[in-house]
Amino acid sequence: MAELTAYPLLTVLLAWPLGGALLTAIVRQRPWAGRIALSSALATLGWSLLIVVAFDPASGEFQLLDAAPWIAGLGIEYLVGVDGLSLFFLPATALIFCAAIVASWRVTASSTMPLSPGLYFALLLSFETATLGIFCALDLIVFFCFWEASLIPLYFLVSLWGIGSGRQTAAVRYFLVMLAGGVPLLFGLLTLVFGQAKGGALVFALPTLLAGALPEGTQYAVFLLLLIGFGVKVPLVPLHTWLPAMAMGAPAAITAILVGLKLGAYGLIRFAIPLAPLAARDLQWLLAGLGTLAILYGGVAALVQSNLRGVLAYSSVAHVGLVILGLSTFSASGLQGALLLLLNFSLCSGSAFLALSFLHRRTGSTDIAQLGGMIRNLPLLSGFFLFFGLAGIGLPGTLSFPAELLIIVAALHSHTGAGLAALFGTLLAAAAVLAPFGQAFLGRPRLPEQAEVDDLLPRERAVLLLPALLTVLLGVYPKPLLDWLRPAAEAWVAGLAGLL
């Protein structure tokens, strides 16, 4: 394992939003709570960029490690660190939370409970700390604690500030489904620890576990348990049933975070596949099949949705299927494509939901049947929504194009049938974006009051413009990002080969 750093950069990163959450919980008035929340989020973003600068891209090892004893009797310690696989998820997470805070600037209390905006921002920043912790944690129990801690603020954010009468049902369903998914996840992690225990000593540190090897029989149990635990949050079909309800009932800013940050897919990359490589290789057909199923099912389901939020939700199911397909190739190019696509989710899928939040604020609806002609009064909003929709399906010149190209080429080389299905899935995804766009944004307004709405405010333009520029910049010239990812991707693949 790499040496511990003298400067706890990652610990400070986790402290920024947590400190902001405490302040916003105390200062509950709307203007100051929002300013404190945004300041904390911007400080977190700036600190995450400092971490990127401090990172050595030539190394495929874990860096910037920070450790402290926690439960010494069991060998559990607070251990955080990053490598090339997790590094860029830190600024991506910080950026999407900044956008979510700005998009929530006019957040209002629930119609049934007089709650302060400060509580909303405190929960949102607490959620950011838990999410960043998931990407940083290198001790299995610390990771699991961050994983479960993310559920608490989400439950209250959705149930208290959600949309419509179904928000509480969506919150309860999500909470219970994720708790149920946490059971096989915890069992898988503990099976992994006990399977590698030597001389009675338990090891929870991920770098040490990656250097060891599990018995063949134990690998299958660990891989399947982790696949189910992480698959619930990916979400894999048929474990995706919570997503449509959340897309319809959760605040759009929260849905943007859930769709933009695929924590379950990260869990597969970080834990499930490298820690049980033999089982993953033998069950390669299962990963490829689940990815292909998600691509086709998500594309078809998106085509028949009557609400734009449902369209984006099922489109995200199809897109994450491409990620799983790329992982199933067990190649550096497939992994690089999967990581690029996950970063693209943060920029494009999340921003598309934020655009819908701005649309809902102006029209009171995102139902396709109640919209029409939005491009006349909302040309900027319409253009951004179309751009992010196309940028999510592989539009040349955007980040998703090199990502999907790497995945499809790797899939065609590894399993041709799944690669061809992925190509067909891109056609479904394009139709799922263009058809509802034509109905909702083109033509004539269906309701007279929709002709009087105003276009994006300056702060709303800034929220959508920055990810759009990053998407184009990284799509036109992805080489620097690929160069940063390559050492870690090659180390990931080499680690799989060495443990087979």
Image (tube, rainbow, N blue to C red):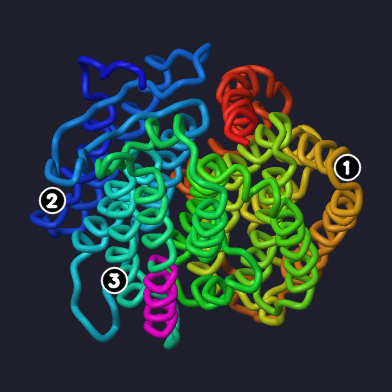
Instruction: Choose between 413 and 11: the one closer to the eye.
Output: 413
Q: Is residue 494 left or right of 407 when viewed as pictured?
A: left
Question: Measuring 42% from the left and 54% from the top, which residue is drawn there?
Answer: 103
Three-letter code for the amino acid on which mark 1 is drawn: Leu
Q: Which residue is label 2 attached to?
A: 22
Location of residue 459 in the rendering, given as x and y in whole percent from the top left corner: 44, 45
Residue 156 badge: 3
Q: Is residue 241 above or below residue 207?
A: below
Three-letter code for the amino acid on which mark 3 is drawn: Phe
Label 3 Cα neighbours within 10 Å, binned few <14 / some 14-19 / many ≥20: some
Q: Is residue 118 above or below residue 461?
A: below
Measure the alpha-carbon separation of dots 3 and 1: 44 Å
Q: How many marks?
A: 3
First in residue order: circle 3 vs circle 1: 3
Q: Which residue is label 1 attached to?
A: 412
Secondary structure beneath disc 3?
A: helix
Quadrant where the N terminus is found in the figure? top left
Q: Nearer the viewer, mark 2 or mark 1?
A: 1
Location of residue 415 in the rendering, given as x and y in whole percent from the top left corner: 86, 47
- What secondary structure do most residues of the magenta stretch adopt? helix
The magenta stretch is: 167-182
